[in-house]
Each structure stands twice: as C-alpha cells, then as structure tokens.
Image (cartoon, rainbow, N blue to C red):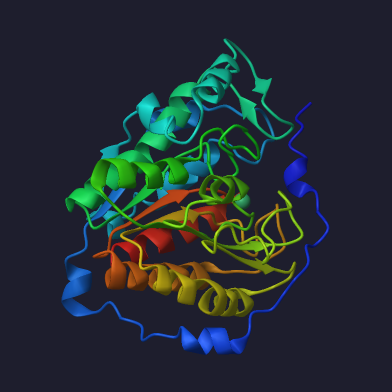
Amino acid sequence: MVRFLALHVAFPAGEVKFQSTVWLFRHAKPVIMLTGDAKDRMTTLLLTHPACLAHDTGYGHPEQADRLRAIERALAAKDFADLKREEAPMADLAAIERLHPKSYVAEVRAGIPKELHNWLDPDTVVSPGSWEAVLRATGAVLRGVDQVMAGTATNAFCAVRPPGHHAEPSRAMGFCLFNSVAVGALHAREAHGAERVAVIDFDVHHGNGTQAAFWNDKNLFYGSTHQMPLFPGTGAKDETGVGNIWNAPLSPGDDGEDFRTAFSTQIAPALDEFAPDLVLVSAGFDAHLRDPLAQLRLGEEDFRWVTEKLLEAAAKHSGGKLVATLEGGYDLDALASSTAVHVRTLMGA
Ligand SMILES: [Zn+2]
C-alpha cells in the first residue's frame, strides 16, 4: 500500500506575530526593473536528465515521473528554442557531504533497493533508479551554480526529481533525499567564493530541510512563503535562526494577492538588505489553485510575478546570477503551465 500520507496532514498553526510597519518602511529601497538590454543579454540554462524519470515512487504517488514528462512537453514549445540545454551531471559525493554527513549519505545509498521499493519515511519512497536520479538532481544544481558563477549562463532552471527542500542534513523526508539547493549554496561559497547566498522558496510547503541547514549561518539566507498549517509543520514567523531565516506563512484559501503581499513585505526587504552574491530558488508550483496537496489559490501570473521579483533582486545584487530548481507541483497541467511561465520569465521573455 502506498503510504504518502504526511503531506496531507494538517499541523496546528504556530504562533503568529506581525512585524511592525516601521521596520518595513525603514528597509524599503527602490526596485530595479529589468528592461531592454538587460533582458536581451540573459542566457538561461535548462538542466535535466532522463535518469530522473527512473526514480520510481510507485503507483498513485503524487511525486511521479509524469511530472517531468509534463514539463518536458511544455518546454519543447518553440518559445523555448533559445534555452541552453544540458544533461545534468551526477553530483560528486564530496559536494553533497559538505551538507549531509557521510554516514547519512551512506544510509541513503544503502536504503536503495535492488528491486521494487523501499520507504525511507512514510512519504519518501525509493527504487533502484533513485540513486542516480538524486545524484543528477543535485548535480543539476551544482552545474547550474558553476555555469552561472562563471558567467557562461545568466540563470538556470533544473527540471529534476526527487525534490530536495524537506531533506534535513541527517534525515530524508517529504519525498526528498538530498537538499540540492542547500548543497548548491555551500558549493557556491566553497568553489566560487560567494560570500552570501540566498534561497527563496515559494513551494507551498515549508522547506524545513533548508531552514535546518542554514539555521546558524548568517551568510546564508532562507526566505519562504508557504501554507500553514500544512506539512511539515515548521515555518512559523518566529523561527528566525540568527536573523537569516524569513518565514511568511499563508493561510489555507489565500490567493495570489495575499501571496504577493506576504512576499513583498516579509521576504523582499530582508533579501534586499542581505544583498546576496547568488540567488537560489526552490521553485515548487504546488501553491497553484489546482494542486491536490494544498489549499492556496495561486495562478500562473503569480509565478511570473515572483520570478520577476527574484530576477530584479538578482540584477540588483548578484549580477543576475540565479539558479532555480524544481521542488513540488502535483497537478500535471498546472505544473507544466506554471513551470513554462517561470522559465519563460527567466529567459527575459
Ligand atoms: Zn511542496
């Protein structure tokens, strides 16, 4: 029996505190718009790999290979002819082990079955193809970081699975094995000399794994909009790390306007103040109205809007350097159309 239950379970809401408007006005800064030449010079890299299809979660699991097939069909349209396309390489274990202890990496590897399925937690299923898939998924982010930091691409989108943002340094959960954006952030610092790296996460679920990875490090920024209460139960406003964690929870039923207000007032000013050398994005599209795992009511235009805001922040602080990777999104049509809008916006179109 398939046991992917926890993502459906509602958790009690955390204590909600409101920030003062004085703080918001004090930190308000002008926004740089992307127009004309700046848009024309953008090269967007698309990283994916067929091995990501071989991570088999079993019949009826929402995190299924058809998600990537739907994205692949959408990105085959002629609007995407200018994408620079590459197959995702497999990540070096040394890069993964900057975040995840060797013992945990070995435990995940040992948990991959020779046939059929194994459950690392009630949601997180692995199959014989999962090891290569997760190395490709993490390798995509590392390759995206390498190319964007080297200036051979302006920004990148990684169409990969399994997702990563629920994976804590020593714990697989919520469909996630290795936390690819957090691994990417540490790689940008170690291999490319980035001093400050931000992860913005607009997946409908809170990225507990990324928050845990960044909790004590003031040079890593985590900003998340997410539904609360919802799996995994973390992400309250008062979870602030060392002043580097910015959670903006939304309520079930909230729409695009609520999302834009939360992002503009609770995430964007802090991101601007942080001034990242690189922007990483946990791009989950399960806040869409049609998604079966949550109750927010975003549409494609909201994903376009937030992508534009992230590009503006990257243009202002990081020379446009931005790498996005796929997290959730479980209605196949909504996922495909939302991803297409996100990637088209990254291309400056
Ligand atoms: Zn999600």
Count of numbered circles in the view = 0
Measured from the top left, where is residue 9 in percent x and y? Answer: 80, 48
Q: Which residue is drawn at 32% across and 47% down?
A: 189
Measured from the top left, where is residue 5 in percent x and y? Answer: 78, 40
Q: Residue lying furthest right in this view?
A: 12
Front residue (pair 283, 209):
209
Q: Look at the image and tell me whether residue 349 can be seen.
A: no
Q: Which residue is drawn at 77% across and 48% down?
A: 8
Horizontal side, residue 103 vs residue 312: left or right: right
Residue 20 position (above or below residue 224): below
Q: Residue lying furthest top in this view?
A: 114
Measured from the top left, where is residue 264 in percent x and y? Answer: 51, 78
Q: Which residue is drawn at 44% across and 86% down?
A: 28
Quarter where residue 141 is shown? top left
Residue 190 position (above or below residue 227): above
Horizontal side, residue 219 vs residue 234: left or right: left
Quarter where residue 239 is shown? bottom right
Q: Look at the image and tell me whether residue 218 can be seen.
A: yes
Q: Residue at x 55, y 59 (%)?
A: 242
Q: In which quarter of the image is the C terminus?
A: bottom left
Quarter where residue 260 is shown? bottom right
Front residue (pair 40, 105):
105
Q: In which quarter of the image is the N terminus?
A: top right
Measured from the top left, where is residue 290 in percent x and y? Answer: 65, 60
